[in-house]
Image (cartoon, rainbow, N blue to C red):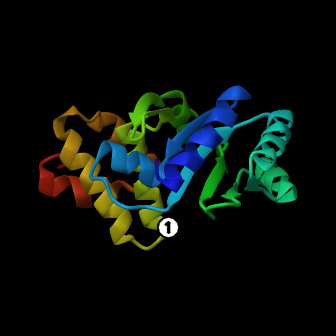
Amino acid sequence: MTPEEEALARVVRSLEGLDIVYMVTGSVASSHHGRPRMTHDVDIVIDPSPEGLARLVDELVSSGFYVDAARARDAMWLRRQFNAIDMQTAVKIDLIVRKDRPFSLEELSRRQTADLPGGMRVRLATPEDTILSKLEWARKGGGSEKQLADVAGVVDVHGGALDRAYIDRWARELGVLELWRLVAKPRGLAD
């Protein structure tokens, strides 16, 4: 296993051991569903209770991660992210507290079980939700080429199997419909 895979496996074991709902997303999800690319960032959406978050922080710290407990508590209440950094390898895991909005609730409810390289089984964002999340990041980053390339990779792999009505509906609601069309139209998946 790579250092990133090992760190992810340890965090996932902690989340599952504490029964905290989670979903691996970001570049790990887009590499799984689309074109693999080297990435050093690992993003995990989590939906803990306040008590579950406190136990998670304690468990991660005891297993060799640096976690700022105050920042984690703030992230819980502000619906933001905090980091867990592996003290031996400096691998950073972004733990993103689930946003309080309809898309985030639906996205988390649709997650699927997937086997990642190294034999690790995780709960992973669907291809459609990976596309939508990457489009949001692209919009925030001014149309980030890396994010759009990740979207294109997922579209190229899944093509006609994608739930286009679902993507169109949420892309419209999330304000990323034009970015979606920019990627989908040349591939015959948008008007």
Report the front residue among 20 and 142: 20
* Res 159 → quadrant: top left
Is label 1 in a helix, a strand or a loop? helix
The number of numbered badges drawn on the structure is 1
Left or right for 140, reference 87: left
Q: Residue at x 78, y 56 (%)?
A: 67
The outermost residue toward the bottom is: 142
Query: Percent from the top left, x then y, of residue 50?
Result: 84, 38
Q: Residue at x 37, y 49 (%)?
A: 30
The residue under label 1 is: 140
Residue 29 appears in the picture as rendered: yes
Q: Is 183 placed above or below 63 here?
A: below
Query: Percent from the top left, x then y, of residue 151?
Result: 31, 54
Amino acid type, label 1: Lys
* Res 139 → quadrant: bottom left
Q: Residue at x 33, y 59 (%)?
A: 37
